[in-house]
Image (cartoon, rainbow, N blue to C red):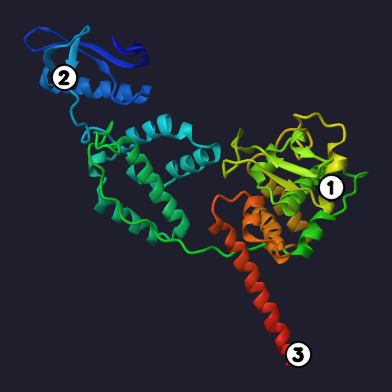
Amino acid sequence: MGVFRRVVKGRRCWVIDRRFRSAEGAVERYRRAAQVQTKAAAEAEERRIIDYWVAHGTVKPLVDSTPSKGNGPTVIRTPQSRAYTWDDAVEHFRAVVLPRRKPSTRKGYNALLDGPHCNVWSGKRLASITCTAIDAWAANLAEVRVAPSTERNHHIVVRSVLRSVGPDEDGNPGVMLDVLPKFPRLPTVGRTVVAATHSDDVALLLSEQDDARRQPRRAAQRRAARLAFALAAYSGLRSSEIRALRRRDVDLRRRKITVRMARCNGEESPPKSGHQREIDITDALLALLQRRCQGLKPAEYVAPKTDGTPWGDSGLRQALRRACNRLEIEGSRYHALRHYFATALFGFGTDARTVQMLLGHASLDVTMRYADHVDQRGKTAVAGFSKKSG
């Protein structure tokens, strides 16, 4: 007796099956499918049932006296909002909701859930997480000067967890919450300034020379990183897309790169936009790819580490930081190489829709940030020209 996996109506689920002896000596049986279908949640529900029996000497208030059509009693589904805690809701969210999300999304949610700000809710009853409590929590985020975008992400995480255990769109009671709290408005986040790597710095990064005779291993590592830098700067690939790029995705004859997959947290999934896209191979990138792809098998990675395995999630960022320190380049981030590609496209007069397609943006608003950056650079250049010619 306890918590088991059973087949109920053709579906395997977690079932709580326990016998109790009442204060009068009668044997009572509690048998039902767990309200939340994870092992941890089912075991937590079993502990609450045991606590109820210890306090009251019976489990009859939890069981309907009307015989069920099958074996065992029919159990009344009573609201459990006061019994469940934030930790129960997080366990359900991670087991039921997150597996359906992309690896990068799962990584982001888990990082915030494990962080200090969401851990404030640990151990608290779901019924106590009200709009007032969330407002007080948000005020603390502002007090410790959390960045607006990060604050917004924390709010989204809290909403997502509570909605996963709350009532559905048809108003049916949730698995843990029967009524959701009234959520405060999401914090507004202004547009971020696009900081693209300067063309001189890109040229410096990609032309760095190494002493292959004295330090062959280090020189090979730097060459591998430079190929990844070139893919970001000359084709606009995200670091996750570079990590997943294979030989079969590079068509040297047609001079096309097909972005099919992205690699994050050791897993491969479709790119951020959810769609594949093709990018023309530039002259500067063609020679690098021809040397690298020679003799590669279709499934082999194009820009891996020296041992042929993909870079880790932070590996390319660290490699870029080391290169910038060596070359005394300030303020360059890996994503800034992708920004360089985007702003260069606008600088050549490419229309916004084409840039959106090449970058794989789901929203045109995101793409237009790069156009605004180019417009501002143009105004600055014209203003400088006016002063000299005036």
Foreground of the two, 174 or 216: 174
Residue at the disc numbered 1:
286
Label 2 SS: helix
Foreground of the two, 307 or 293: 293
The three-letter amino acid code for the residue at tag 2 is: Trp
- Mark with earlier residue (2, 1): 2
Q: Position of residue 178 (x, y in %)?
A: 23, 37
Q: Separation of disc 2 and disc 1 at Cα? A: 73 Å
Taking the view exactly as shown, the residue that stands out farthest to the right is 213
Q: Separation of disc 3 and disc 1 at Cα? A: 41 Å
- Mark with earlier residue (3, 1): 1
- For label 2, count other residues whose C-alpha is less than 10 Å away and answer few (under 14), some (14-19) or many (20+): some
The three-letter amino acid code for the residue at tag 1 is: Leu
Residue 197 visible, this orientation: no
Figure quadrant of the C terminus? bottom right
Foreground of the two, 92 or 194: 194
